[in-house]
Amino acid sequence: MAILQIKNLHVSVETEQGSKEILKGVDLTIRSGETHAIMGPNGSGKSTLAYTIAGHPKYTVTEGEILLDGENVLDMSVDERARAGLFLAMQYPVEIPGVSVSNFLRTAKTAIDGVAPAIRPWIGEVRDAMSNLKMDSDFTERNVNEGFSGGEKKRHEILQLELLKPQFAVLDETDSGLDVDALRIVSEGVNRAKQANGFGVLLITHYTRILNYIKPDFVHVFVAGKIAEEGGPELAARLEAEGYDRYVKA
Amino acid sequence: MTEAIIRPGSTGHSHGGAEIPLQTRSERLRSANPGDHIAIDGRDEQWRYLDQLRLAGLDTNVLTDAATELVFTAPSEFDLTLVDAKDDLFGTAGLPEDITSANAWAAANKASKITLTGEASEPAILKIADIKADRAAHIIINSKTHSRGTVIIDHTGDAKLAEVVEIIVGDESQLTVVSIQDWNDDAVHTSAQFARIGRNAKLKHIVVSLGGKTVRVTPTAEFTAPGSEVEMLGLYFADAGQHLEHRSYVDHAVANCKSRVTYKGALQGKGAHTVWVGDVLIRKAAEGTDTYELNRNLLLTDGARADSVPNLEIETGEIEGAGHASASGRFDDEQLFYLQARGINELDARRLVVRGFLNEIIQQIGIESIEQRLNEAIEHELTRSNH
Ligand SMILES: Nc1ncnc2c1ncn2[C@@H]1O[C@H](COP(=O)(O)OP(=O)(O)OP(=O)(O)O)[C@@H](O)[C@H]1O
Ligand SMILES: [Mg+2]
């Protein structure tokens, strides 16, 4: 049983006009097996939260803390966080020219586990995970994210989630840009990985449709850098009907 | 970043960011006599990126022939002889276009002539290792009609060397020439390499520059009959204080030939400087030409500088295609973040990105021993970097 705690988190970015505060006191606790959905208007700071958890150097934490099983995550480098069990499926996955998917996956798996996976079972595991996600096996020979369509990039993120088996998965708009079939396939991938490994999920989305597949235990409304309201799945339905007006005006 | 493609039917010099040379490339002075060449001057296009002092006298000193210091090992399809200016191939691939190669030509009375007959499955290796200062070398490589094979010129150790290499690619032959500059830190080296390509022939010309304080390689290829192809590949890795310069020139003098020039480099450290100038001339007679040249540079740290200049001169519109691309960019921190977010530590992540960048060239070399040596060299360079 693992626990990820975010306490009174304040985060700034450097801009040409000086430092600008984006997160203004976020409190959130996620336990293994739980699914938390975060919904909120564009620019409210959802990706900032996701990147800050992963340790992107662009974001500076000015106050508050992030703890993984009581350990201070903010002291860890990006790769240490990943090895400690944090995974971020990115809204905009990055292209790495000249690095094949198979080389990348094996290198990442070796880094996370601390030992290289045995070759034959590993190849089988990759092949099965790809076929579950309806990814053509040719992808292993292609360069990481290079020339992938938007939807293919998202599948590739979830492929990594299945293979790297983290403690907590932050999914930043994994559903954006997916067609109806892909949405189902990717959601099933997340559910399968979750069932196998029992991780906690922080799911950032604009749409309730993905929540029909990945059922949230909690829904958080994110507005202007903090959580404005929390509730169960019914909150998502209300947001879909009413939008964020009531929070933004308040 | 500049990128341009010129399609059949289009004419003139409308090719994006490429510089139009002041003087057309074909009009450049060619002479084996050092006295005919003007002294190095930073205003001269040929020398604008290189401080004359860095040549340590290769342009002005009296040099000594290094012919007896070269070591040749090769399978039986190759033959090495020492020849002089009376040899019928001597001076047939090209003549010096700058003062350092003219100086080399004047000093190296004997040329090491490598002749390939038949099909060789193993490469010939000419080792130029730890030679004395102020040396000159003249090498002639000739692939006879229908032959196939590879010649590797392997430069290591200390040197102050001005070199000329003539490459005569016989009709219907397929020749690969690899020039490796893996010198010690203080070495100074210039190498003018002239290729003359026969009918239905193919030359693969590979330049790998890793070590040396100043290295300047100027490969040129001239087509003399239709149906031929040249592939020029270059890879370089410059550290602090190194100047690695490559100037390629493809002369499409006849119809229906194809050329591909692909040079990629990585730079790190203060004062690391690389130069790539890629000239392509498509003459009036060269209808049906298909050419593309590309140079990319990856700057791993601040304080490094990469100059990249494609020059495309087109005298006929009746071509298959002509294009160029040139870009120099800083190491992308988003790539680093992505890899680190998957648990890969920073050093390994940098290695992956740099090797990925250079892979495009390494994979095309097609000689396993060299690919392996390059992978090790890149590994070594990256551990040297202060990251
Ligand atoms: N370098 C920067 N300079 C100025 N503002 C910035 C910078 N980086 C981020 N921001 C701002 O921070 C805010 C939060 O951005 P973030 O990407 O976290 O939003 P989001 O909630 O994920 O939005 P979306 O739903 O559109 O993905 C935005 O208003 C954005 O413009
Ligand atoms: Mg976002």
Image (tube, coloured by chain):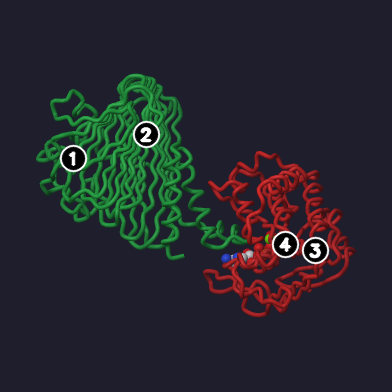
Along the line of sight, the residue nearer the viewer: B184 or A72: B184
| Residue under numbered circle 4 | A166
Looking at the colours in the rendered structure, which chain would you say is drawn in green?
B
Q: Residues within 10 Å of mark 4 (few under 14, many from 20)?
A: many
| Residue under numbered circle 1 | B68
SS under mark 2 = loop
In the rendered structure, the answer to whether residue B223 lies left or right of residue B41 reads: right
Q: What is the three-letter code of the residue carrying label 4?
A: Pro
Which chain contains the residue that carries disc 2?
B
Q: Residues within 10 Å of mark 2 (few under 14, many from 20)?
A: some
Return the x and y of residue B12 as percentages of the image width and height: 36, 31
- The answer to whether residue A178 is above or below residue A74 is above
Return the x and y of residue B20 as percentages of the image width and height: 32, 39
Q: What is the three-letter code of the residue carrying label 1?
A: Thr
Return the x and y of residue B373 as percentages of the image width and height: 42, 47
Q: Are marks 3 and 2 in contact (CB under 8 Å)?
A: no
Looking at the colours in the rendered structure, which chain would you say is drawn in red?
A
Labels 4 and 3 share a subunit: yes
Q: Give the mark toward the camera: 1 or 3.
A: 1
Q: Residues within 10 Å of mark 1 (few under 14, many from 20)?
A: few
Q: Give the mark toward the camera: 3 or 2.
A: 2
Q: Are marks 4 and 1 in contact (CB under 8 Å)?
A: no
| Residue under numbered circle 2 | B123
Disc marking residue A37: 3
Residue at 16% x, 47% y is B59
Q: Are marks 1 and 3 in contact (CB under 8 Å)?
A: no
Which chain contains the residue that carries disc 3?
A
- Quarter, ligand 2: bottom right
- The answer to whether residue B34 is above or below residue B315 is below
Q: Are marks 1 and 2 in contact (CB under 8 Å)?
A: no
